Image (cartoon, rainbow, N blue to C red):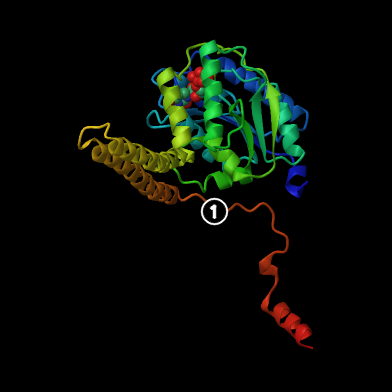
């Protein structure tokens, strides 16, 4: 276990809010109780808190946050200039909180996630885990539709080679060094669930039951959900492009078979004149075109990856500090080696 983890961490709970006036007072009171208990049990520093990000709400969300900020020492707020979307609002909160916090837990404002596991998150952190994923035990509280689409989504992601934690949404604990590294990912198309596993470090899962929404409606209608899933795949995988190249090659092989078939038919005299040459051309050109498209796609995919400017590596630990080896010492060492 590293030294830093023996010291009591300062925790911030970050929650993005979009038109959440109906749930916020309850959320704040429940989170306050949890924070008080954690402080009392000596698990977190007393200057821990919660940060609510108002994602351009059109209702009273911000004035509620404002009001609580005056009366409740745990409550902080961040107001975005317009609706930037859940993922961006969450990132804004994480980046603001990391300036003050040692650990950050992100949670939706609607109290669907079980708050009691926050304690477990912190215990896992103190065991040396930098990332703790909240994972749903089951999807019983979901509609059949949401359950099946979610399953299809995870299957598809897996097929596309995107590493996401099954049944984990954005309820998780991240340490400061994970957040510092997350800051190095400059991409605009955010899909945090795919990014966090890319960072690495020791991670673990904590299982919990997800409740129905406490009040208000879901801010994720089908349209937003589909575009989120599409975003997840296209932000992390160039496999769809490779798929085109593969079809191109398959079609080229098939075109040889079709050419032989057409020639045989022609020799037998089964066909009208011109049929064989047209058939052969169609298959052959089709194959060539798809291969070419796929090839161009490969380059586009490469450019796409370059433009993301993702960090190429992330350091976990470093033993000797290079700066402590001064010129003097190196010289002495050379003397020893040359003797
Ligand atoms: N949210 C947000 N901006 C948006 C949409 C949603 O900040 O544009 C927040 C919302 O207030 C909630 C969280 O993201 O705290 C998750 O949204 P919701 O609970 O509606 O999604 P669901 O649980 O139905 O998937
Ligand atoms: Mg919700």
Task: Look at the image and tell me whether residue 177 can be seen.
Answer: yes
Q: How many C-alpha atoms fall within 10 Å of the one at disc 1: few (<14), some, or many (≥20)?
A: few
Report whether the residue tagged 1 is closer than 8 Å to ligand 1: no
Task: Look at the image and tell me whether residue 55 can be seen.
Answer: no
Q: Residue at x 66, y 21 (%)?
A: 115
Q: Which residue is drawn at 68% across and 75% down?
A: 326
State the SS at label 1.
Answer: loop
**Nearest the eye: 60 or 127:** 127
Q: Which residue is drawn at 55% across and 44% down?
A: 182
Percent across and percent down for residue 166 are 61, 28
- Splitting the image into 4 quarters, where does residue 337 fall? bottom right
- Residue that extends furthest to the left in the rendered view of this protein: 273
Is 155 left or right of 173, judged from the image as shown? left
Residue 120 higher or lower than 161, as above or below: above
Percent across and percent down for residue 114 are 65, 19
Percent across and percent down for residue 240 are 44, 37
Q: Which residue is tagged 1?
A: 312
**Nearest the eye: 283 or 114:** 283
Q: Residue at x 65, y 28 (%)?
A: 134
Is 64 left or right of 202, judged from the image as shown? left
Percent across and percent down for residue 189 are 43, 38
- Residue that extends furthest to the front in the rendered view of this protein: 268
- Splitting the image into 4 quarters, where does residue 228 fall? top left
Residue 226 higher or lower than 94, as above or below: above
Q: How many labels does the image show?
A: 1
Looking at the rendered image, the quarter that the C terminus falls into is bottom right
- Residue that extends furthest to the bottom in the rendered view of this protein: 339
């Amino acid at each position: 276990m590293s030294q830093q983890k023996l010291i009591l961490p300062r925790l911030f709970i970050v929650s993005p809010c979009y038109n959440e006036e109906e749930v916020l007072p309850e959320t704040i009171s429940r989170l306050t109780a949890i924070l008080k208990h954690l402080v009392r049990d000596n698990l977190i520093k007393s200057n821990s808190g919660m940060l609510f990000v108002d994602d351009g709400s059109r209702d009273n969300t911000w004035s509620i946050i404002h009001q609580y900020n005056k009366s409740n020492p745990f409550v902080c707020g961040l107001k975005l200039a317009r609706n930037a979307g859940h993922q961006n609002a969450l990132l804004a909160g994480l980046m603001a909180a990391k300036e003050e916090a040692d650990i950050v837990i992100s949670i939706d404002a609607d109290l669907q996630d079980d708050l009691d596991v926050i304690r477990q998150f912190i215990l896992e952190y103190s065991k040396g885990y930098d990332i703790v994923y909240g994972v749903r035990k089951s999807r019983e509280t979901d509609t059949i539709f949401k359950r099946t689409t979610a399953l299809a989504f995870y299957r598809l992601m897996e097929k596309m080679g995107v590493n996401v934690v099954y049944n984990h949404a954005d309820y998780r604990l991240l340490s400061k060094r994970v957040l510092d590294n997350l800051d190095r990912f400059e991409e605009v198309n955010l899909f945090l669930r795919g990014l966090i596993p890319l960072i690495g470090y020791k991670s673990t899962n904590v299982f919990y039951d997800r409740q129905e929404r406490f009040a208000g409606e879901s801010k994720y209608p089908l349209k937003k959900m589909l575009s989120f899933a599409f975003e997840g795949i296209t932000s992390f995988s160039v496999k769809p492009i490779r798929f085109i190249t593969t079809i191109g090659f398959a079609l080229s092989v098939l075109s040889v078979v079709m050419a032989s078939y057409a020639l045989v038919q022609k020799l037998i005299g089964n066909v009208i004149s011109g049929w064989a040459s047209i058939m052969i051309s169609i298959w052959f050109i089709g194959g060539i075109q798809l291969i070419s498209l796929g090839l161009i796609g490969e380059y586009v995919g490469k450019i796409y990856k370059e433009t993301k400017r993702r960090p190429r590596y992330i350091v976990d630990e470093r033993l000797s500090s290079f700066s402590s080896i001064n010129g003097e010492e190196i010289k002495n060492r050379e003397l020893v080696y040359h003797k």
